[in-house]
Image (spheres, rainbow, N blue to C red):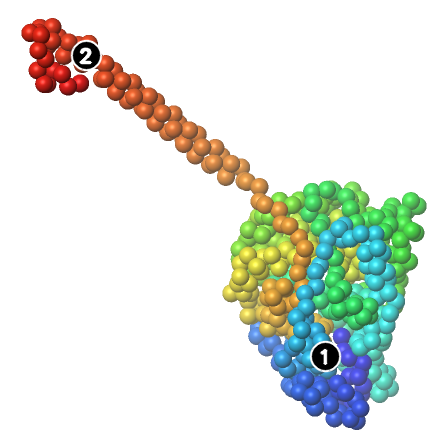
Amino acid sequence: QFPRQCATVESLRSGMCCPDYFPVFGPGTDRCGVSTGRGRCVQVTVDWRPHGPQYIHDGRDDREQWPIRFFNQTCRCSGNFSGYNCGSCRPGWSGPTCSQRINIVRRNLLDLNAEERRRFVNALHQAKVTIHPDIVIATRRREEIFGPDGNTPQFENISIYNYFVWAHYYSVRKTFLGTGQQSFGGVDFSHEGPAFVTWHRYHLLQLERDMQNMLQDPTFGLPYWNFATGQNTCDICLDDLMGARSNFDVSLISQNSIFSQWRVLCEKPYKDSGTEGGPIRRNPAGNVARPMVQRLPEPEDVAQCLEVGVFDTPPFYSNSTDSFRNTVEGYSDPSGKYDPAVRSLHNLAHLFLNGTGGQTHLSPNDPIFVLLHTFTDAVFDEWLRRYSADISTYPLENAPIGHNRQYNMVPFWPPVTNNEMFVTAPENLGYSYEVEWPGRALHVTEMITIAIVTALVLVAIIFAAAACIVRVKKNKDELHQPLLTDQYQHYSDDYDGIATPSQSVV
Ligand SMILES: O=C(O)c1cc2cc(O)c(O)cc2[nH]1
């Protein structure tokens, strides 16, 4: 959550987190790369607008008005520069002056060849065991951050992948209300509100960027898992991908997969440390107590969800109806209608995994999380493209805490608002998805309407054809009749051997 350089008594006391870009000039002389025009140290902007009624403990949580409880000054970078010290480039840009455009392609995991699969699995494992070069995490709440002696900042190193896990956990954990008091659970900075899509988008971008740096490969892109193929099996649960099922325990991963060795972080809820626990549990389609989550979404569900044209609707929560966000998140049925009994799309895919990946405070521990969310993000990006990124229904205020449009997403640093992620990815964030979207099948009512219209058109054609035939027949008859009837009569009645002009013209 914070750069290592800011995890000091001085930085915390001053509230300033503006690390040097080029420390050669001496400490504090090149804050945010100011000497080379990369950026400068400014006051943090926070969202003070009211939040929704779900959160009732204002003043008790470090995540309120993020990140002001920890720091009130940050780097603001110029142009395409970015990062905690303006030492990197904005997504979509690269090169020493961040002036080269780049595009990263996120592909279907199942389309990777054997070598690409091996490299991706190895990269994830490397991220799991490599200490994050820049970021450390706070292991105590703000009021205890200086440690028992008041002089030892309580921060820890964490691996790149575990930081990804921890950030999700920190965003969903309950509000601590004091020793012996029950923590408050009506709070979630990354789910059940409009920030669901923007928060997870940034979360993935940050992992992708960290892995690019780790691999020294700026072209590295996270693949996706199309969980809506209509099959009710985990098709990526193979030993060369996310790990097959163990032969010895249905809820464990096969020992042929490196992921069987991964240990779960944040298993003991509400203890802020990066200690690892037991193995990843996963039993796809194995929740016999809840048959509804023993299946995966259908392609048609994605197609229907993309027809929901309004981004979000009041109360901007998990009971919103006709909201694209609540539909892709999976609290509404795929057509957008809210139904408390329904779990669809993203939520259904989580619950289908039935184990570590199905519990909000733990789910990123299972690497399937990454792939499940890249696909969810692909759906979001397709929605943004289809509806020209219409942000008008993204609320500025009264969304659940953390979800207002201008709120800085918790616990990211430097501060980044939900707003900044509400843009089409290829043009603004430098990545795109290689994906084909399913066409929408017709509803019964639409099929009936089409059948009726077709029948009416057919009847009309038949009538028109019949009328035509009758007319042609009549015309034909008219052609022959005068010779045989009227005129013949005239000729025969008073025939004198010379036809009058009127009689000779047929
Ligand atoms: O019960 C749900 O709908 C549900 C479970 C679950 C797990 C998870 O990690 C999420 O990110 C969301 C989610 N929803």
Q: Is mark 1 within 8 Å of ligand 1?
A: no
Q: Which residue is drawn at 10% across and 18% down?
A: 502
The quarter of the image holding the N terminus is bottom right
Crowding around mark 1 (Cα neighbors within 10 Å: few <14, some 14 to 19, many 20+) is: few
Question: Of 8 and 342, which appears nearest the observer?
Answer: 8
Report x, y in % for residue 369. 76, 57
Q: SS for tag 1?
A: loop
State whether residue 58 is above or below residue 506.
below
How many numbered dots are placed on residues in this image?
2
Q: Nearer the viewer, residue 486 or 13?
A: 486
Query: Can I make out residue 51 in this image?
Result: no
Location of mark 2 (residue): 483
Which residue does the numbered mark 1 point to in the structure image?
96
In the image, residue 54 sits, relative to residue 114, either above or below, namely below
Q: Separation of disc 2 and disc 1 at Cα?
A: 98 Å
Above or below: residue 341 compared with residue 131: above
186 relative to 79, above or below: above
211 or 156, which is in the foreground? 211
**Three-letter residue code for mark 2:** Leu
Which quadrant would residue 205 be assigned to in this image? bottom right
Tell me the element at label 2. helix
Residue furthest out toward the front: 498
Q: Looking at the image, which residue is at 76% across and 50% down?
A: 110
Q: In which quarter of the image is residue 298?
A: top right
